[in-house]
Amino acid sequence: MKYAIVGGVAGGATTAARLRRVDEHGEIIIFERGEHISYANCGLPYYIGQTIPDREDLFVQTPEKFKNTLNIDVRVRSEVIAINREAKTVAVRNADSGETYDETYDKLVLSPGAEPVKPPIPGINSPGIFPLRSVPETDAIKEFVDERKPKRAVIVGAGFIGLEMAENLHERGVFVTIVEMAQQVMNVVDYEMAAQVHQHLKTKKVEFYLSDGVAAFEQHNAEAEGRSPRRADWVPPLRIKLKSGRTIDADMVILSIGVRPESKLARAAGLDVGETGGIKVNEHLQTNDPDIYAVGDAIEFPNPITGIPGITYLAGPANKQGRICADNLVLGNRKSYKGSIATAIAKVFDITVASTGVSEKTLSKAGIKFASTITHSSNHAGYYPNAIPMSIKLLFDKESGKVFGAQIVGYEGVDKRIDLIASVVRRGGTVDDLMEIEHAYAPPYSSAKDPVNIAGFVAENVMLGRSRHVHWHEIQGCDQSAIQLIDVRTPEEHALGSIEGSINIPHYEIRNRLDEVDDSRTNVVFCVAGQRAYLAERVLRQNGFDDVYNLSGGYKTYEYAVQKQENADIFALDVIGKDDNLYRGAEPAS
Ligand code: FAD
């Protein structure tokens, strides 16, 4: 059997390696357009930031190693430019010789990945503007940072890669500005969870603009225009004009606007491509041509929760698909792919942001009814030193308890919690499963009730109607003649800041102050995180107050979500001039 594979990184290299382990005698050829196979694309931002100091560490495998250990014929700088399904051949162009030749196959695997989106913005091809997808692009960015020592960088797009680059350029001493078209960073999480990331970015002195996009990139004509108004001795080569009319001067720009599936080759060969632009495959990862399979970023597959076809741009699914695909190629279609629940995680400076399953945004768009809770729990026992909180947003079906997804933002232990919830979502598990998770516990690692258990308990209370939750956006600017907001924290906490118009009845006094609770209005109780408010809610409910709600995620989530999200104009005169936390006076004269 002769197998040809297009693309030699995550999905392609995994498929090839597994193929060899299952079929010792088959002929396996990988065609890779670039110079490298099986490299660590996920590590590229950290090489630029020098956390990964040695470039060689990025190369998990080399063509030579693949040949020596697995007898796989790897042809780099070889682009497959056409597939002839009738003749079962691929046309390959060798980038060195410029020659094109045909190669036959019995079975073909497509793992061509995704290509960066490059919208037709004027000036987008100017020098100093970099996409980040491949090793050569990484080398170009690293060389620019090493040699030109840029003072300021603009990152366009605040997804995972954009934020990783923000951190890594910041590590290199560059002042970073992010421009994001959406009203929040990291679109995979919901707004109030992203709001925590916004506040963290502020503490790290990252400037960012939301709900704004780039209108044009211009080369700065230093002689004609003179010096930058921001700093007398700095002539930045790029001027970035935003749609809002704002201009930002910078030495370099990273484009991380997003990617789309590389499906041109498949489309030209008459393979079915879905509305998402991804190659359509069945559960065996087989295209509409039984001799052609496809894996990775280039395929579309129904989301296991919504049933809606989508694309998952993640390394884990690509690798796992490679293994399934190889087994199916050799053994017949024995294995089924079940789809990805898009479990993802990113380090954003000191915090970790993770998600699994689907978000509130996606559920709403899909018209799926859901309930959600936000809980804040410590990563380990509070009495053990250095306990630090994490926030968990849980989305579930209020009737069946089926868990649709979760998002976590925190400092420590976010990874294991998201993995626990992911395993429940993966098998269609419920809130009961979260409550029952038996985790490893000792004070340095967790609490007897893990944050994941707590999220389950709170969701169960909501399902049983023991607690009714209201969300921050439902009470923001609400009509207080109809709603009474009761802050059940201590008077000291209340005095330090609360929701405007709220009254203060500490939860430990509420039994004796029921006459202050106006039962002609809806009552919303809140504390910092929701726990004390739950105690107060139970007292009220059991004393005949039915129209009572607990503010989900408490004042903490509310405060994050309602404050100003952007961090604008913080770089003045090449130093941090002002930001919302540090400087509340007039803008310093430049
Ligand atoms: P790729 O690994 O991209 O491989 C596709 C290969 O096919 C490319 O090398 C391309 O040159 C080649 N190719 C395309 N067309 C042809 C052709 N016609 N002929 C020959 N060769 C061709 N995912 C995570 O889960 N976690 C992370 O932390 C993470 N970080 C990332 C950071 C960066 C900077 C990038 C770029 C990606 C990151 N990803 C991460 C995404 C992850 O790398 C991808 O989801 C994964 O690599 C997809 O595998 P793939 O095989 O589909 O495509």
Image (tube, rainbow, N blue to C red):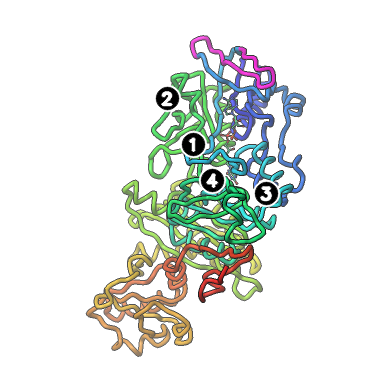
Callout in the foreground (1, 4): 4
Residue type at mark 1: give it.
Arg
In the structure shown, which secondary structural element does the residue marked by tag 2 occupy?
loop
Task: Say whether marks 2 and 3 touch (CB < 8 Å).
Answer: no
Tell which circle, 3 or 1, labels the residue nearer the N-terminal end.
Answer: 3
Which residue lies under the disc numbered 1?
260
Tell which circle, 1 or 4, labels the residue nearer the N-terminal end.
Answer: 4
Residue 363's place in the image compared with 488, above or below, is: above
Residue type at mark 2: give it.
Asp
Q: Quick check: is 99 in the magenta stretch?
A: yes
Which residue lies under the disc numbered 3?
46
Whole-percent x and y of residue 403? 42, 53
In the structure shown, which secondary structural element does the residue marked by tag 3 occupy?
helix
Residue type at mark 4: give it.
Glu
Q: Left or right: 447 with respect to 465?
A: right
Whole-percent x and y of residue 562? 42, 68
Q: Nearer the viewer, residue 403 or 551?
A: 551
Q: CA distance from mark 1 to mark 4?
A: 26 Å
Q: Residue furthest left?
A: 520
Answer with the quadrant where ligand 1 appears in the image.
top right
Whole-percent x and y of residue 567? 51, 63
Quadrant of residue 60 within the rendered picture: top right
Callout in the foreground (1, 2): 1
Which residue lies under the disc numbered 2?
272
Residue type at mark 3: give it.
Tyr
Callout in the foreground (2, 3): 3
Number of marks drawn: 4
Q: Label 2: how many residues lie within 10 Å, few (<14), some (14-19) or many (20+)?
A: some
Q: CA distance from mark 3 to mark 1?
A: 23 Å
Where are the magenta residues, as a range? 85-101
Q: CA distance from mark 1 to mark 2?
A: 16 Å
